[in-house]
Image (cartoon, rainbow, N blue to C red):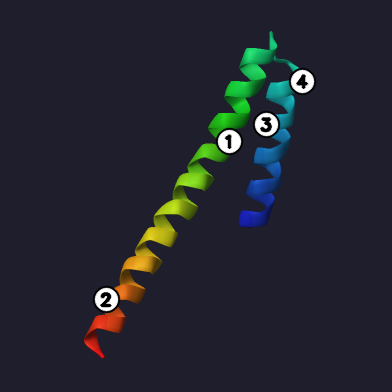
Amino acid sequence: MSLILILLQVEDIKEKIKNAPDSGYEIGVAIGTYLPFVILVVFAYIIYYRMKNRKDLEE
């Protein structure tokens, strides 16, 4: 089910870029699409790194 939602979202992004009034809008759509994913990856890495260091201190 989630795969279908992801595919529909990709089509929605392509449609937004296709109907974009100018290149600034296209850049905004791209940033708005990828920025949440990048933030999530950075957050996960920070949590992983902190937990790894904490685990090393306990031994």
- Please tell me in which quadrant of the rendered image residue 29 appears: top right
Q: Position of residue 57 (x, y in %)?
A: 24, 82
The quarter of the picture where the N terminus appears is: bottom right
- Label 4's element? helix
Q: Residues within 10 Å of mark 4 (few under 14, many from 20)?
A: few
Q: Amino acid at mark 3?
A: Ile
Q: Which of 53/1 is in front?
A: 53
Secondary structure found at label 3: helix
Amino acid at pointer 2: Arg
Of pointers 3 and 1, the one earlier in the residue sequence: 3
Q: Which one is closest to the eye, mark 4 or mark 1?
A: 1
Instruction: Check whether the beta carbons of the residues at disc 3 and disc 4 lie within 8 A of each other.
Output: no
Q: Circles 2 and 4: CB distance less than 8 Å? A: no
Front residue of 31/55: it is 55
SS under mark 2? helix
Mark 1 and mark 2 residues within 8 Å of each other at the beta carbon: no
Q: Amino acid at mark 1?
A: Thr
Instruction: Find residue 33 and name its label.
Output: 1
User: Considering only vertical position in the picture, is 1 above or below 9?
Assistant: below
**Residue under pointer 4:** 18
In space, the residues marked 3 and 4 are separated at their CA atoms by 9 Å
Q: Which residue position holds label 2?
A: 54
Q: Which residue is mark 3?
A: 13
- State the SS at label 1: helix
Q: CA distance from mark 2 to mark 4?
A: 48 Å
* Distance of label 3 from label 1 (alpha carbons): 8 Å
Q: Amino acid at mark 4?
A: Lys
Would you say 41 lies left or right of 46 here? Answer: right
Pointer 3 or 4: first along the chain? 3
Q: CA distance from mark 1 to mark 2?
A: 33 Å
Which residue is at the far right?
Answer: 18
Which-is-in-front pick, marks 2 and 3?
Answer: 2
